[in-house]
Amino acid sequence: MARKTSKHTGTGAAPGAEQRHEEQLQGTAGRGDLTGYVLHRAKPHLPPWLTAGALGVVSLPAHWQWGGSAAAGVGLTLASVALSGATWWAGRSTSSQRRLHSAVTVAAGSAWLTAAALAGPMSGPLADLYLMGAPTLALSWNIRMVMRRNPDATGNESADKGLLEKVGLAKTLLKGTKVEPNRVTVGYQLPPGELVNDDVAKALVRLAGALDVAPNAVRMRPDPESAGRGELIVVPQDVLKDGSQWPGPSAPGGSIAEPLNVGFYEHGDPLLMWMSGDPAVSRNAMHLLIMGMTGSGKSVSALNALAEILTRRDVIVWGSDPVKVTQTFGPLIGAMDWAALDMASTEAMVSALEAVIPARTQWLAAHGYNQWVPEAAEPRADGTPGMPYLVAWFEEAAKSLREGLDFTGIAQEARSAGVSLVVSMQRASGYQMPTDTRASLGSSWCHGVRDHTDAGFALPEEAIDAGARPEAWKDKKPGYAYLAANGIDQDEWATPTRSHNITVEDLTTIAADYTAVRPTIDPVTAKAAAAAAGKLFTDRAARTGQTTPTAPLPAPAGGKDLTPVHEDDFDGIDADDFDPEEELPSPAGTVRLAERPAAERIAVSPSEARDVMVRLLEQFEQDGMETVGPKEFMAYCDQFGRKRGWVSGEIARMVIEGRLAETADTGRYRIVPQLATV
């Protein structure tokens, strides 16, 4: 489109070549060859004058041949009419002005030639008509040529106008073409009252097809102050395909308030995102939705961001991945304050976030902060520690949502507490994520998706209307994405980006080399989290990367040890010692089985039974158990005459009192400590 525009409007690459040629000619003229320069400039304007001169010359032999002939007069008149009609017919594909101009010129010239051939060119007023009319017509075509080359002309004759007509943007004026390496920007003005910017957005895919480029290679940038003006942007080649190696941390030892370098735009600028808010520029803290189908490169993008975060001095990370466990976070797990790698820990992390938000907000308000700022992480004047920023990162969040976890309250309340929530999943449809939660995640990082509908779950309408098409990538271009986030100019929301290629060695270096830079959790956040999550939080370091076995139950008085039997108990027994075909030996005697004696029951009052339940729960907690259910209590409660229904009712009472918390597993409850210490 740039080349066609330059042909007719005098902009683009072609005028540059013409300008260099003109400079060469001017240099030649400076050496005295002025005549050559003038002839070069005059050549484009000579054809109308040569045609006018040829018409006068031809009139002489025509008069000699047909002068005074009535039959010739009829023939020449018919030929004149036919030639004018043919000109009008041939000009049907051109503009109406050019068609009329051509037809008038042919009609006037053929009419004069007919009269001159019959009466003679010097008869009556024919000579004066020729001397006045021929130069006038020639000059009119010269003027037309000059106007066509004027860069301020409307461009109605350009091939671009025909292209725009094909895609439903007739009468659109193109102006102000800007040509850059692999990028062409063209301003447009829509016909008032006929088209608006929304019509341009709907035509972008058709325009890409007409230009034979990728569906997302044509985008628009509407003028915020006009419904009918804007810019069209065409990027004919994919400059992201080669990728880029991870450049290393952009601000090692800096604050989380500084931007994170997580990739690059197709125009070469770095892709920056901001986690924390900044009241000075009215930027809110970021809650981020990362979306894309399997194989679209979400994990690579996540690692780019986490690698940056874990080199900053005033931020801690809580990360959850109950599906891939260590596969995504990998070497960065040891650098996180809390890594929840199973559903029990993930549930505890959500509960902890709900508890720490009011605690952190209260602390910030008490120290004079309306929202978290880097100064809040600095030690206080009395020597007490500050409060680092908190990033809660949930990978494979679809599983957590299916298990009944709710991020809505966290997303709505966490910003003022210095907490950013990141939720990563393949498809944030209303079936998997509540719309209230999705609406509260104000920023989105959308990778390749299956179709246009899926794109709408992540990207705002402004990005899609401007030409964002993540469905064009699907899973064929990992790492390609659109980032529509706080702090990023809306004009860039529809610009394709790609995350850096980061390696395991890079991540290992980050985890090892920046240990001294990363802060420890503050007491306010730690205390609130421990009170809500118990040992799943206080023992988080020991649980990282391993499965904690369930602690055996202590044997009830006079009862049997209920410790489960494991395969390891059979070590040393070789299966080859047994012959499955060998007959069993005959019994040596008969053993009479006595009836099972009834368990001795202790008569206790309801209040005493409740005290037993409380002591049992305390014992379970001391033994390291994290979750309990009716079956653990029933091993003991049967001795003092309490049935399962009574036990379930007491468990429900403990849940109401906050001593137990429900989990995603039916019949299992997480122990909430009465007094949490860190």
Image (cartoon, rainbow, N blue to C red):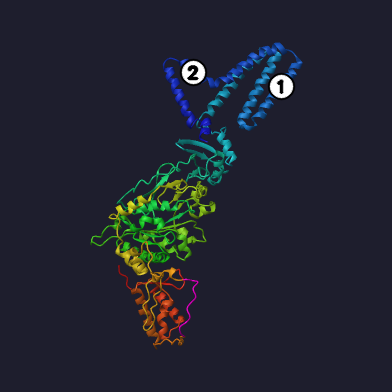
**Place of residue 28 in the rendered image (x, y in percent of width and height, measured from the top left):** 43, 18
Instruction: Give the numbered dot on residue 38.
Output: 2
| SS for dot 1 | helix
| SS for dot 2 | helix
Residue 516 is left or right of residue 585, and the answer is: left
- The residue under label 2 is which amino acid type? Val
**Place of residue 505 in the rendered image (x, y in percent of width and height, measured from the top left):** 35, 50
Front-most of 320 and 371?
Answer: 320
**Quarter-of-image position of residue 130:** top right
**Place of residue 565 in the rendered image (x, y in percent of width and height, measured from the top left):** 41, 73
Question: Which secondary structure is most common in the magenta stretch?
Answer: loop
Front-most of 378 and 326?
Answer: 326
Residue 275 is inside the magenta segment: no
The span shown in magenta is 579-589
| Residue behind mark 1 | 79
Q: Farthest residue toward the right?
A: 71
Point 52% across, 33% down: residue? 5
